[in-house]
Structures are given as C-alpha cells and as structure tokens.
Image: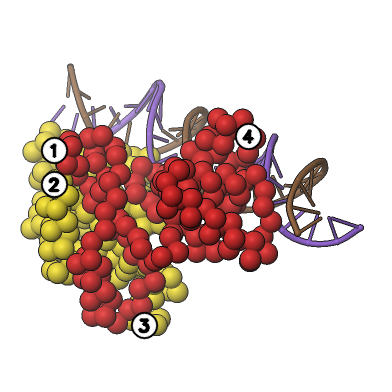
Chain colours: A red, B yellow, C purple, D brown
Amino acid sequence: MTERGQRWAEHAHERLTARGHRAGGARAAGIDGQAQGGGCCTAAELADALRAGGGRVATASVYRSLTTLQEAGLVRASDLGGGERRFELVHPDGLHHHHLVCRNCGRMVPFTDEALEAAIHAVEHRLGAQVEAHEVTLHGLCADCR
Amino acid sequence: MTERGQRWAEHAHERLTARGHRAGGARAAGIDGQAQGGGCCTAAELADALRAGGGRVATASVYRSLTTLQEAGLVRASDLGGGERRFELVHPDGLHHHHLVCRNCGRMVPFTDEALEAAIHAVEHRLGAQVEAHEVTLHGLCADCR
DNA sequence: GTTCCTGCAAAGGTTTTGCACCATA
DNA sequence: TATGGTGCAAAACCTTTGCAGGAAC
C-alpha cells in the first residue's frame, strides 16, 4: 500500500467513526481494499481481495460499505465503461485526478492537469451552473501501447 | 427531429449500407429513434419509442443495432451514472459536446467548450498518449436549479 | 444490553445470448 | 435464394433489498 493510500485509510476510518459508524469486516474490506488497490476497484474486486486473504465477506456488504463511504465523501463512484462501477478514493487534500483508459492494454492511467481544471471552472461560470464534481475520461492508447 | 439529427440519420443509414449491413426495423429504431430523441437515449427508451408508434421491436435487437452503430463509429456509449448506458450521436462533422448532469432536476445540459478541448489535447501530448475519444461530465446544479 | 453492521439469499434491473423465423438484397 | 437481421425467451451480469444472527460500542 502506498503511503498516500495509508494516510487515506486512516483518515477514512477516523471520519466514519466520527460520523457514528461502527467498524466491521466489510468496512475494512472497503477501506483497506481500496487503499491497497490504488482506489479504482469494483465492489467484486474488493470482496475477492479480502476473501483471497482468508476473510469472509459478502459482496452485498461491500456495496453497503461503499455507499457509506460515498455519503461521507471518502470515495466517488465512476462509470468508466464496461458496465461495472468503479470506486475512486477522494483524498483529504482535495487533489484529484482523471483517467486515460487504454483500449489495448486496458490499463487506466491517472493524470492531473491544471489547465483542464481551469477550463472546467470557466465552463461552470459560463453556464451559470454550480459544479460539485466532475470527471474526465480519455479513451485511446497509452504511451506504451501507442 | 432537428435538421442536424436528420442529416445524421441519413449519414448513418448510408454508412451502414456501405458496410454491408441490411436495413430492418430495429436498425430504424436505433437510428431514427436516436435522431429524434436528440441522441442521449437508453436502449429501453428507443424500443419504447418505436413501440409507442405502433412498431414491434425487441429491446435485444435495439442493443444489437446500437452495437453495430458503435462499431461503425456512429454512436458512442457513455455511462453518466444511474446504472443505465446511454448512447450519443457521433456527428460526421466531428463536433461533439459534453454534459452537465443536474442532481436536482436530473436534466442533462449539453455544452461545448474550446478551451476544454484544447486542454485535453495538451494533456494527450504531455502523456504521450493517443486519445481517440474523450468525455467530460460535470455533476452539480444547473443554472435553473441553482 | 442495544444498536448497527454483516452474511446469506433472493429480488430487481439492465444487457447479452440462443434459436427459429422472416425480410432484405 | 442465401444471408443476415429480428423477435421472443432465457440466461448472465451487476446491484439492491430483506431478514436474522452477530459484533461493536
């Protein structure tokens, strides 16, 4: 697990406890699994990962944990295509990234870009809207596969 | 149907014929339904629209038509959340738009933005990737609901 | 001890597949 | 006429919900 993921996991456990939630196995699967997986996992992947480690967890409970994490603003659901919902970490420092999905190797390459964020902010102003979240997904070939 | 949608429908029928596909009822539902619906419909909506007009079409066939349209580069699937896949028109002039999804009224507000496109193009270059398609989705409140 | 979380099972929804029939070219 | 598209039905898939048991506080 990356140090950044570790920090997020601690932050997530603390925030859930502060909100009055209890700590159980499925919650650990949701949080620690996300932190270890880098934060772009499906519910089934998280459940499988915990079961592979000897744990016993129901996929349904992972969904429930992820719903709780969403409500607490700790993860965000995103459909990158493929019919399955993936869940991303929301870091306390506010930094977030977007994704390039490679159609050859299937990898998801995360990236950040200030100009992109600025452009989105400008669109928000121009439309008179109030943007609370946004996602950008690029489809094509990653640098390795090109 | 808008004139732009009309042009797209003719273009789509021509391209499918050129690719050796035959014209049937479900294909008409896929193409004409998309053109009339403005190009942001689910498969079920397209099937219902045709059935409301007295036609008889299976939802499964609409899915098959949409798959064919995707392979021909005439529509693009996008998950805007909500668990259902929506299909958007791909216009021959290359112009495309993105969406603001209002969490209050549920409306999808389309928009275009050159600075946004430029920023994405710059990201593509910086990553050394080859971007073939991209989508930007904003979530929040539209101008009316704010 | 009480409340909430969890596992299991079943239901719900969307999308895909199998197969025989029919229409297009 | 031969091929591919179509409708119907069933399967497959992901996600949600109900319920009783168990764990956390």
Q: Residues within 10 Å of mark 3 (few under 14, many from 20)?
A: few
Answer with the quarter of the image where residue B122 lies. Answer: bottom left
The percent coordinates of residue B98 (x first, y second) are 24, 64
Q: CA distance from mark 3 to mark 1?
A: 43 Å
Taking the spot 60% from the left edge, 47% from the top edge, the residue there is A28
Q: Nearer the viewer, residue B14 or A140?
A: A140
Task: From the image, tell me which residue sits under label 1.
Answer: A146
Q: Residues within 10 Å of mark 2 (few under 14, many from 20)?
A: some
Q: Residues within 10 Å of mark 1 (few under 14, many from 20)?
A: few
**The disc numbered 3 marks a residue on which chain?**
B
Task: From the image, tell me which residue sits under label 4.
Answer: A55
Q: Amino acid at mark 3?
A: Asp
Label drawn at residue A63: none
Residue A137 visible (yes or no)? no
Task: From the image, tell me which residue sits under label 2.
Answer: B128
Task: From the image, tell me which residue sits under label 3.
Answer: B144
Marks 4 and 1 share the same chain: yes
Q: CA distance from mark 4 to mark 3?
A: 49 Å
Q: Amino acid at mark 2?
A: Gly
Q: Nearer the viewer, residue A58 or B90?
A: A58
Marks 4 and 2 share the same chain: no
| A5 sits to left or right of B127 | right
Determine the secondary structure under disc 1: loop
CB contact under 8 Å: marks 2 and 1:
yes
Residue A74 visible (yes or no)? yes
Q: Point out the frontmost of discs 3 and 2.
A: 2
Q: Point out the frontmost of discs 4 and 3.
A: 4
Furthest toward the front, the residue is A3
Q: CA distance from mark 2 to mark 1?
A: 8 Å
Q: CA distance from mark 4 to mark 1?
A: 40 Å
